[in-house]
Image (cartoon, rainbow, N blue to C red):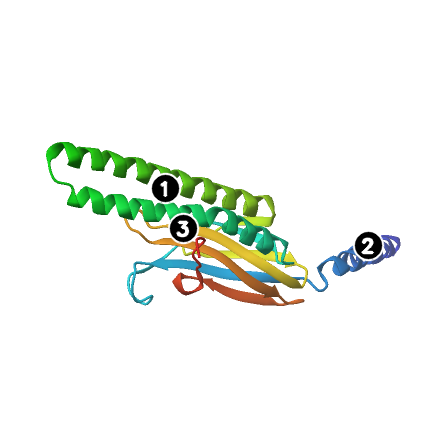
Amino acid sequence: MKLSWNRIFLLVVGLALYGALFLSSAPAAEGQGSIRGVLYVSYPGDLSFDVMFGADVDVLLINGDGTVEKDFESLKQQRVPPIRAQENAVTKAIGEARSATGAEKAKEKRETLKRENEKLEKLRSEYEREVTGLLAKTAIQKTKTDKKGNFKFAGLSPGRYLLHARYELRGTESKYFWFHAVDAKPEGEVEVTLNKSTAIHPYD
């Protein structure tokens, strides 16, 4: 009988401890939500054709209070006009290279075109590097998509967030850049699709 009472006592103590731990941890999860998404890309044209999932792609979760968006817009206003001007310079150089007559003149114009292209690539590279640095610096969480393009952010306080990812289809002109706003709900899960229709152009 004594052994039986000891067992009952230990069981009661164990249940009390478990209950205390459960109650103390409950408030931490209260009101938290999650964002579940899928990222997929396609070749130019109909999204329902040649669709493939974006596997192993970095996805950043950023605070959506507006600060990052203002910084991003400010960066665009500084960097994009010189890029557009240089694009015009390249277009002009292409026309001159095509219309050049004579071997010497054609060679000169091709070299000019090469220099203008290099200037353009440098401006684009610097701008994209600054954008990447700005967004990475302000990221709250970071994850990678799985082989089916799935990703998830959990334990989020209710509020507005931004999802950022980028992807390039090698060998094509298809580049995807996402800067997508999402509202996390308390104790709920929001589903998001990052695809061609939700992508933006960082130069616009």
User: From the image, which quarter does the C terminus lie in?
Assistant: bottom left
Asked if residue 145 shows in the view, the reply is: no
Residue in the foreground of this view, choosing between 58 and 110? 110
Residue 36 numbered tag: none
Residue 21 position, x and y percent, is 78, 55
Give the mark nearest the N terminus, 2 or 1.
2
The quadrant where residue 22 appears? bottom right
Local packing at callout 3 (Cα closer than 10 Å; few below 14, some 14-19, many 20+) is some
The reply to whether callout 3 and callout 2 are in contact (CB within 8 Å) is no
**Residue at point 71%, 64% (across, down):** 31
Alpha carbon distance from label 2 to label 1: 66 Å
Q: Nearest to the eye among marks 2 and 1: give it.
A: 1
Asked if residue 5 shows in the view, the reply is: yes
Q: Determine whether the residue tagged by mark 3 lies in a helix, strand or loop.
A: strand
Q: Which residue is mark 3?
A: 167
Q: Which residue is mark 2?
A: 17
Q: Nearest to the eye among marks 3 and 2: give it.
A: 3
- Residue closest to the far right: 2
The quadrant where residue 26 appears? bottom right
Where 181 sits versus 136, above or below?
below
> Mark 3: which amino acid?
Tyr
> Mark 2: which amino acid?
Leu
**Residue at point 86%, 55% (across, down):** 9
Residue 65 position, x and y percent, is 65, 58
Q: Nearest to the eye among marks 3 and 1: give it.
A: 1
- Residue closest to the far left: 102
The quadrant where residue 28 appears? bottom right
Q: Which residue is mark 1?
A: 120
Alpha carbon distance from label 3 to label 1: 21 Å
The reply to whether callout 2 and callout 1 are in contact (CB within 8 Å) is no
Q: Determine whether the residue tagged by mark 2 lies in a helix, strand or loop.
A: helix
Local packing at callout 2 (Cα closer than 10 Å; few below 14, some 14-19, many 20+) is few
